Amino acid sequence: MLWEVIAVIATIAIFVLGQKLHRSYLIAYIIGLIYGAFWEFSAESFFNYSGFGIYVWRDIPLAILMLWGAVIAGSMLISDVLQKKFRFKNKKWGRLTFDTLTVTAVGWFLEYSGSHYLHMWTYTAGTYGSLLAGMPVIWLLGWISVGVFVLTFIRTYGDLIKLK
């Protein structure tokens, strides 16, 4: 039940920090939930989760889905702060660069921490190729693609699907 509590705290923290920045991260959080559900259901056989209290489906914990929303929205929040501090001449390339680097760094850190230190999951044997720092390289490429595609989607279409 610890990870479910942490997921709720992370979710609340994203929205509180977003209010301080005068920006809503609700759409990013919801799209993070949707993408996380897609990812977790499609990659269910590659992970063995442990230590969770509530599972949505077989081996997919509710906390992991909530944390997907928090990671996507939190990465956008961090990227927004960095973009204000370090300005690119070309705003679109600056946004893409900060979004991709931020979500890749956050995702890679959480991937490593979750699998090595927090023991939230293990990778199933024989399903991955080369490793980088004890983790499958394919997950690093996955986090880069999240930055390029998911965050770009949210930035591009987020205004069209605002919730009021």
Image: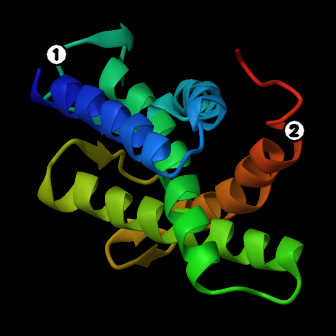
Q: Nearer the viewer, mark 2 or mark 1?
A: 2
132 left or right, relative to 79? left
Amino acid type shown at disc 1: Gly
110 left or right, relative to 2? right
Residue 68 image offset from top left, x and y in percent: 47, 38
Label 2: how many Cα within 10 Å (few below 14, some 14–19, many 20+)? few
Decide if residue 22 is in sight here. yes
Residue 160: quadrant of the picture: top right
24 left or right, relative to 126? right
Residue 116: quadrant of the picture: bottom left
Q: Which residue is mark 2?
A: 157
Residue placed most toward the observer, 18 or 56: 18
Residue 6 image offset from top left, x and y in percent: 20, 34
Residue 77 image offset from top left, x and y in percent: 52, 55
In the picture, which quadrant includes the N terminus? top left
The disc placed on residue 13 is none
